[in-house]
Image (tube, helix red, strand yellow):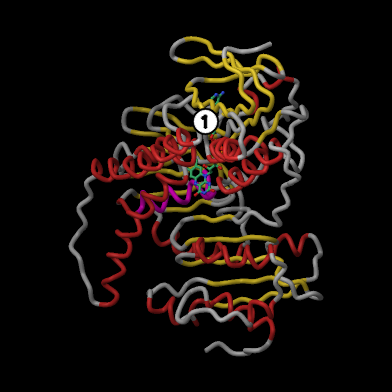
Amino acid sequence: DRGDIHAEVVVLGAGPGGYTAAFRAADLGKQVVLIERYPALGGVCLNVGCIPSKALLHAAKTLTEAKEASLYGIRFGQPEIDVGKLRSWKESVVGKLTKGLSMLARQRKVTVIHGTGKFVNPHLIEVETSDGIKTISFDHCVIAAGSSAARIPGLPADERIIDSTGALALAEIPERMLILGGGIIGLEMATVYHALGTRISIVERMAQLIPGADTDLIKPLYKKLKTECEAIYLNTSVSRVEADKEGLQVFFEGEQAPEPQRYDRVLVAVGRRPNGKLIDAGAAGINVDERGFIPVDKQMRTSVPHIFAIGDIAGDPMLAHKASHEGKIAAEVIAGHKVTFDARTIPSVAYTDPEVAWMGLTETEAEKQGIAYEKAVFPWAASGRAITMTRDEGMTKLLFDKVSKRILGAGMVGPHAGELIAETVLALEMGADMQDIGLTIHPHPTLSETILFAAELAEGTITDLY
Ligand code: FAD
């Protein structure tokens, strides 16, 4: 059937996956309709994820750097924090970017329809808009409906129990907050609220913070957070929360469980759930797994060949740069290009202080998989630049194939690690070996040199740190 509107390509969801797919498809000559339930484009990443969190982390860094300056004889007074102004500045950052996206959509003649969409059949989507139901028929569809914060069943419904969206709203600066979950999002919020003056505790079910990352990369972060937080409970979980007038009484269980504690806020940051079960995918015959992910092949096709899925809804890792890369692939496949997802790695970054970044094989994975590797570690205590920054706790670690000497993986911890990791991603994609990196002149004095020095250590062209 023909809908109220017919589209060559309809994209469901306008996050980094969806808008990238829509824009690429339009650039390739397709007539595109983009459906988004929220007034602003940009999805989780721009509105309640990557961007507002980085804006607040920037403010946090200013506060901590002002404190650190006393180490070299510069003292500022107690900072005055105007929460209202900080909040509106953060909103203006988000607004600039989302408005930019609306402009890019207009320039490409992408039709944006605001409303909640769901499938009616394999060629029809129904959208509930503010002026009634609109139906859209399509030749191709890209599902980019993303994910939502995971909830913990059994917690009371109380507005003092918040998720990352609540934390980013920055309604106020609580006195004492428990962060439930020691993953990237929880730790980024811990960094922000600690800098703003909140007393922070973190509880993590696993034996280490950011369980997916190498232990030795997490150590410097853990050490710093230990001095900043009131408590970090590992191998521990929350068994119950009781809400009363004075606050939230939290009960713990596990290895490091303390006596019940009272907090003003509890931030639940225990992961994200794909939105695959919320769009009536079954009506189009699309397979959705039990967790809500939509399985796809290397061309981002679902079980229904003319319907694609990308981003958080199509599988882990749930990262914006993975979503946008997949968005381009889906659009190009629809336009008839012979492309597949063949990236060798997707880098991960925790924008904490220090930052932690890694890509390719981690050492833990290499050990588990029995892969023969050589490792080189360059401690930032030997980096002139890190010392000038009063931040020498970091390290750069490279893993190479024992035989071919090609780079297999890299990890870094320290300020700007998230920026530095990109060089090693390029090295991996290009199949660079330790000599390629070792012969590349890096500017001095920079943190990027630590990558060169690590490669030289691996090669044996330097044997000592200088
Ligand atoms: P989303 O961004 O989730 O977008 C999906 C869109 O679809 C949404 O706008 C939603 O409203 C819309 N939608 C859903 N269902 C429907 C429907 N039925 N009808 C109409 N519209 C619908 N990633 C990074 O790479 N770097 C970071 O620094 C980073 N920081 C983060 C910080 C936080 C606090 C959070 C929560 C996440 C962060 N992420 C980060 C993850 C990142 O936000 C996601 O990986 C990314 O947004 C996924 O993009 P997406 O296009 O798949 O989906």
Image side of residue 437 versus residue 379, left or right: right
Residue 449 is situated, as x and y percent measured from the top left of the image, at: 53, 78
Residue under the image location 57 percent in, 63 percent down: 422
Residue 72 is situated, as x and y percent measured from the top left of the image, at: 28, 77
> Closest to the observer: 176 or 426?
426
Q: Counting other residues with Cα less than 10 Å from the Cα at mark 1, is it few (<14), some (14-19), or many (20 or more)?
A: many
Place residue 281 in its image quadrant.
Answer: top right
Image side of residue 313 versus residue 246, left or right: right
Is 85 within the magenta? no
Residue under the image location 63 percent in, 35 percent down: 313
**Magenta stretch secondary structure, dominant:** helix
Q: Is residue 259 above or below residue 114?
A: below
Q: Is residue 262 visible?
A: no
Image side of residue 270 versus residue 410, left or right: left
Q: Is residue 384 above or below residue 227?
A: below
> In what quadrant of the picture does the N terminus appear?
top right
On the image, numbered disc 1 is attached to which residue? 110
Residue under the image location 63 percent in, 30 percent down: 143
The magenta-colored residue range is 181-194
Residue under the image location 80 percent in, 66 percent down: 371
Outermost residue toward the front in this view: 29
> Closest to the observer: 242 or 7?
7
Judged from the image, the secondary structure of the residue bearing numbered disc 1 is: loop
Type of amino acid at the residue the image marks with label 1: Val
